[in-house]
Amino acid sequence: MTKESFQAISLKVKEMKVNGKQLYGCLVMDEMSIKQHVHWTGTRHQGYIDFGLGGKTKEMDNLPYAKDAFVIMVVDINTSWRVPIAYYLINGISAEEKANIILNCLQELDTTGVIIKTLTFDGAANNLSMASELEANLEKMKVKLAVQTFSTSVANAILFCMNDLKLDNFQGADATIEFCLRINKIFDILNTRNFLSKGTYNKSINKRTKTEIVHYIEESIDYLAGGFNAMKNQQNVSTVDHLKVQTSNPEAYRTLVHYLRNEKAEFHTFQLKEDKPMRIVIRNLHPSTSTEMIKNELEHRLYEVRQVTQVISKIPLPLFFVDLEPTDHSKEIFKLESILRTKIKIEEPHKPKIISQCQNCQAYGHTKAYCGYSPRCVRCGDDHSSSACPNSRQDPMRCALCTGALYSPPRHNISNATFTDYFNTIKNNFIIVGDYNAKHNAWGCRTNNPRGIVLYNFVNANNFNVLAPPGPTYWPSSPAKKPDILDIFETKIPSNLHCLTKNILELNSDHSSVILNVSATVFARVEPPRLFSPLTDRLEFQNIINQRIDLKIKLKSNYDIDEAVNNLTMLIQSAAWEATKPNKTHDSKNNYPIVSDQIRCLIVEKRRARAKYQVTRLPSHKTADNKLANLLKKVLAKYKSYEFEQKLHSLSVIDGSLWRETKRLLKYKTASPHC
C-alpha cells in the first residue's frame, strides 16, 4: 500500500469537510500483465511475487517470478480524480487472498474518512467468488458495500440496450450515487435473463428485455433531471453543476428538447449535425448571375441544394454561398471546375474568429436559436429582453455578464456559506473585481489569511478562476505593514477567452488600480525595456557618470527636487545607452533580421495554412496556402527593399562605413575549385 496516496485522500476529505461536503469513492480492482524480470534495486531483488513482505530474501529461495500486478485504485465520485492506493506482484491469486487484500484496503481507507460506495471488477469466476467471501466478511463487520461486476459481456449488453439515451456526465455526489444505485436494477434484469451464465453474453437479446432496460434508463434520466432541478431550486448544489445529456439519434434529441421546453427548464443545446448544411463558396461567377440558375445547375448535377445566397457589399460581388445537404456526394463538389460555361473556384467559407454569443441570455458558446435560458438585457443586465428594457438609451450601460465591483470589509467574518449565498445570485458567466481582503499564495500574496483560505477552497470547489495582477495593489501608510495583493478578479468565463491583468501604479490612494484585458486571441509577450544588456560596458558607464554628474545643486523647494530627479534619470539613461555598443559580429547564424510583428504573424499563418493543407488536401486549403505565400513574398520584398534603403542612408564617410560597404560589394569572389 502507498502511504502517500492515503495521506492525499485524507487531506482531500478534510478540505471537503471545510466546505460542508462528504467525499465518496469507488474502489476499482484489476489484474495487469507485466514482463517477468528480476533486478536488484540496491537494497533488494524486485520481480518475484510480493505481498508486501519486502521481496526476495535469503529465506525466500523458492518464490516464483511475478507475471501480473494486482492493482487497486480509488475513483472519486464527487469530482474527477483517481489515485492508485496499492499493488501486489502476483503469479496467480486465490479469491480468499483477494478478499483479504480488499478488506485491508477498506479498513485503511476508513481511517481517511472517505466513504466507499461501490467495488468494481470484471466478471471472472475468481472475482465473483471473492465478492461472495468479501460480502460475508463485511456482514460480520456490519458494513454494506454495493458490489458491481462490470464484465465485458454485461458492458456490451448495457451499451446495446442504451442506444436511445445515455447519461454522459453529471457533477454532484448525491445524484451520481443515486444513478449508480438505480443502474444496479439493470444488472438484476440481466441476471434474471441469464446474461451472466458461464461468463458468456447472448447477443440475441429478446425484445422484451431490451424494452424493459431502455424504459428504466429513461426513467432514471428523468428522475435525475427532476432531482437536479429540485436540488438547484433548493440551493443544495452549486450553480456550476450541470446535467449534460447526450443523445445518439435525432429523434431522441428532438424528443428531449421538446420535453425540456414544455417543462420550462433552463438549458442550451446545439444544432444537430444532420440539420447543419454543408456551406461552400463559389467564386468568379458574374455578379449578374441569378441564384435560381445556379441552384438549377447544381441540382442538374445531382447535388441537393437548400439555398443559394449572393454576397452583397454595397454592390453585388462575384461570390455566392451555397448550402448543400450533408451527404457523401456533396463532398465531391470541390472537384467542380466550371458551371454555366464559366470557370469557377469552390472553397470553404472562412470561419469567423469571434466567439459566438447568445442574443437572448448574452452568454458565450451558443446562439439564440438554441437557448432555453431566461433573457438578459444587453443594456442594463436585468432579467428581461433587450427590446423590453424600460431604461433610457442615455442611461449608463451595464454588462449582463459582469456583476461589477465589490468590497469586503476586514471586520466581518466571511465563511463558505457567505460566498455561496452571494454567487447563487449570479447567473451564467461573470467577472467580479474588488477588494476581498483575502490573501493567499495561490494568487501571489505574501502570506495566507483565514479569509483567503476560505476563498481559495470556494473557487476550487466551484471551478471559478482568480485573476490577480503581477504586483501589489495595496500600499499601506504604516511602515510596519508591507505592500500586498488585495484587489483581484473572480471570473467564470469560457476557456477560449484569454485574460491579462496589469497594475496601474497611480498613487492616488492606498490602493492602485488594476486592468483586466480579455481577448479571443492569445496575447503577445512584450519584452520589458532594459537599462543594461550583456553588451553594456559597465566601466565606461561608471566613467561617464563620474564625469557628467553635478552634485552642487540646491534642493530647497519641490521644484528643485523634481528637477534634480529628472536630470539624474536622464543622465543614467544616456550613460547606459552610450556605454552599450552594438553587436558588430558578422556571423549570419547569430544575426537574424528583426522583422515586425505583422510579418511574424503572417509567417505563422502561412505555416499553419501549409500544415492544414498537408493534412486535409482540400483545394480550398491549397488556395489559402498559395495566397498567404504570395502575400508573404510581396511583404518580404518590400521589407528587404526598405531595409536596404535605410542601410544606404546610414552610410557615411566620417566613420568609414561607406568605404567598407563599397569594398565589400566590389570585392572579387573567386570561383570554388570544386564547381
Image: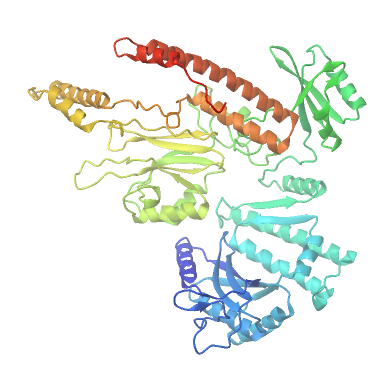
**Where is residue 373 drawn, in percent x and y?**
64, 41
Q: Quadrant of residue 115?
A: bottom right
Answer with left or right where residue 338 lies relative to residue 457.
Answer: right
Compare residues 232 and 498 and report the one nearer the observer.
498
Answer with left or right where residue 638 lies relative to residue 407.
Answer: right
Relative height, residue 261 to residue 654 (above, below): below
Furthest-right residue in this view: 300
Task: Give the residue displayed 21% in from the left and 41% down from the top.
Answer: 477
What coloring was used for the rendering? rainbow
Asked whether residue 368 is in view, the answer is no
**Where is residue 670 drawn, in percent x and y?**
49, 20
Answer with left or right where residue 402 lies relative to residue 332.
Answer: left
**Where is residue 102 drawn, in percent x and y?**
59, 79
Q: Quadrant of residue 658?
A: top left
Task: Give the residue displayed 76% in from the left and 41% down from the top.
Answer: 272
Compare residues 336 and 494 and report the one nearer the observer.
336
Furthest-front residue in this view: 673
Asked whether residue 446 is in view, the answer is yes
Compare residues 197 and 392 and report the one nearer the observer.
197
The quarter of the rendered structure image containing the C terminus is top right
Compare residues 575 and 277 and report the one nearer the observer.
575
Task: Give the residue displayed 48% in from the left and 76% down from the top.
Answer: 111
Relative height, residue 326 to residue 317 (above, below): below
**Where is residue 613 drawn, in percent x and y?**
69, 33
Question: Total label count?
Answer: 0
Task: Give the residue displayed 52% in from the left and 35% down from the top.
Answer: 522
